[in-house]
Image (tube, rainbow, N blue to C red):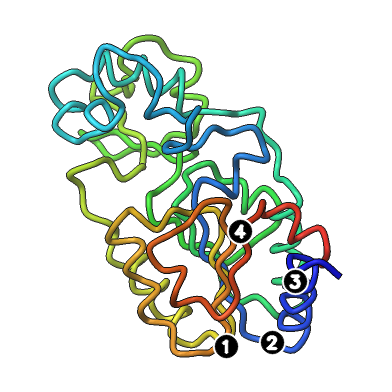
């Protein structure tokens, strides 16, 4: 048995034995659904725009240059035809079985819910939710997709996606929920994240158990803290459950 297969077998055994699992995921969870990640070689951060993506996806840029923001946002941040992959599906199944107590995600694509997950802490918000900055009316994703230029409310106010932009703080209620489930977990699976984005990556320190699994194709700053390290794709691991 190769080393990776032995590690996947250990992972499978731990999942079987645990009944309070939490999954913490990043962009790598959705790349197998065809949604590009930010930091890989062909990710958004290495493509060419008039401004760097970090600038466009900032609060101040949204305020100052809303039309340009929306051009990039519609083009690159919305993937309405993306479908959940094996990882999303298996996590939803584990929740249904009562083993998984929550998904903490840095993704904004809503694919965990589309797969059937109920307890999802969306640290960075969701493209599926939007609201008017003036009257606070709620809008679904169609309001953005079917509009041109700056998305406007019927009251004339600007519609803002409910995603956490650079320079904005994370929602307190979401953070508190994520901290609670992570601190109570007997197994924490961390997958598809470079663990480079704070404060999200800092949530891992609340885990008290001895089954910290890190699944990521490339190295992360917390590899040495993992009880089990799997440097491969998530689909390869979750297809064995």
Q: Which residue is mark 3?
A: 96
Q: Which residue is mark 1?
A: 186
- How far across and how far down the image is residue 235, in percent? 73, 52
Tell me how far mark 2 sits from mark 3, CA to CA: 14 Å
- How far across and how far down the image is residue 158, in percent? 25, 25
| Residue at x 34%, y 54% (from the top left corner) | 196
Tell me how far mark 3 sits from mark 4, CA to CA: 27 Å
Q: Which disc, if any, is residue 231?
A: 4
Q: Are marks 3 and 4 in contact (CB under 8 Å)?
A: no
Q: Earlier in the sequence, mark 4 or mark 2?
A: 2
- Quadrant in the rendering for residue 160: top left
* Residue 1 horizontal side relative to residue 163, left or right: right
Q: Earlier in the sequence, mark 3 or mark 4?
A: 3
Q: Earlier in the sequence, mark 1 or mark 2?
A: 2
Q: Which disc, if any, is residue 18?
A: 2
Tell me how far mark 1 sits from mark 2, CA to CA: 7 Å
């Amino acid at each position: 048995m190769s080393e990776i297969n032995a590690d996947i077998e250990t992972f499978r055994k731990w999942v079987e034995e645990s009944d309070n699992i939490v999954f913490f995921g990043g962009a790598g969870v959705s790349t197998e659904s065809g949604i590009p990640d930010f930091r890989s070689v062909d990710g958004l951060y290495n493509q060419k725009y008039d401004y760097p993506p970090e600038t466009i996806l900032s609060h101040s840029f949204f305020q100052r240059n809303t039309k340009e923001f929306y051009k990039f946002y519609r083009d690159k941040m919305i993937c309405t035809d993306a479908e959940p992959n094996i990882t999303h599906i298996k996590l939803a199944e584990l929740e249904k079985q009562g083993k998984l107590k929550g998904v903490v995600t840095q993704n904004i694509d809503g694919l965990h819910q589309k797969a059937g997950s109920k307890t999802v802490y969306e640290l960075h918000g969701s493209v599926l939710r939007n609201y008017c900055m003036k009257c606070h009316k709620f809008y679904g994703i169609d309001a953005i997709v079917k509009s041109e230029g700056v998305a406007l409310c019927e009251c004339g106010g600007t519609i803002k996606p409910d995603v956490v932009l650079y320079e904005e703080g994370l929602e307190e209620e979401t953070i508190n929920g994520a901290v609670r489930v992570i601190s109570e977990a007997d197994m924490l699976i961390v997958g598809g994240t470079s663990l480079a984005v704070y404060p999200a990556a800092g949530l891992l320190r609340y885990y008290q158990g001895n089954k910290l699994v890190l699944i990521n194709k490339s190295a992360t700053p917390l590899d040495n803290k993992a009880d089990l390290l799997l440097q491969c794709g998530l689909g390869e691991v979750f297809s064995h459950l």
